[in-house]
Amino acid sequence: MGCPARGSIERTASAWIAFARGIEPVLTGPVEAPRVTSVEQWQAALEEAGTLAPEAAKAIVSLHGDRGARAIEAVSEDRVKQYRDFTVVVGHSGEHVVENGGCTCKDAEYNLDRDDPAQRCWHALAVEIARRVDRVDHHDMWYSDVRDFL
Ligand SMILES: [Zn+2]
């Protein structure tokens, strides 16, 4: 663990998380704003930049709230792991497998509408972000071999 050579993205991400957390939650009720478009916008912005630019980080946190902030933190700490068989996000309370935008965590299971791309748990968001900014931590092994998750 520990790779201190990457300074810039961590500073950028954490600065924008701090900034965005100071803003009142925007989505407090039924909102007519085109949320799907916004998701597509930050995803496109990440793909174009190939890095987690402040504008994209701000958009992610304003759209996804604390889930977005946690996702950015996870990406900046290289907690998105790609195994041969599964994509796994390491959280503070365990690891979760993310497949096709779905996740094994309780947040995804109980709180979120899987058909709405704006509703993603932070694990799924972390995967979406990490893939676009090339921050996935690759492991040339089978997750099913290293982890009893059933
Ligand atoms: Zn999850």
Image (cartoon, grey):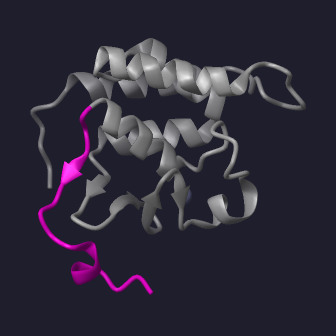
Q: Residue at x 64, y 21 (%)?
A: 37
Q: Is residue 61 above or below residue 101?
A: above
Q: Quadrant of the C terminus?
A: bottom left
Q: Is residue 105 above or below residue 119?
A: below
Q: Residue at x 53, y 48 (%)?
A: 122
Give the number of marks.
Answer: 0
Which image quarter: residue 142? Answer: bottom left
- Note whether residue 16 is visible: no
Magenta segment, which residues? 134-150
Residue 139 percent across, percent down from the top left: 16, 60
Q: Quadrant of the N terminus?
A: bottom left
- From the viewer's perspective, tell me whether residue 130 is left or right of residue 7: right
Which is the main secondary structure of the residues drawn in magenta?
A: loop
Residue 80 percent across, percent down from the top left: 32, 51
Q: Residue at x 76, y 23 (%)?
A: 26
Q: Is residue 2 above or below residue 128?
A: below
- From the viewer's perspective, tell me whether residue 126 is left or right of residue 19: left
- Note whether residue 30 is visible: yes
- From the viewer's perspective, tell me whether residue 58 is left or right of residue 49: right
Magenta-colored stretch includes residue 64: no
Residue 11 percent across, percent down from the top left: 31, 24
Q: Quadrant of ligand 1?
A: bottom right
Magenta-colored stretch includes residue 149: yes
Q: Is residue 121 above or below residue 49?
A: below
Residue 74 percent across, percent down from the top left: 38, 45
Q: Residue at x 49, y 42 (%)?
A: 125
- From the viewer's perspective, tell me whether residue 68 is left or right of residue 23: left
Which image quarter: residue 8? Answer: top left
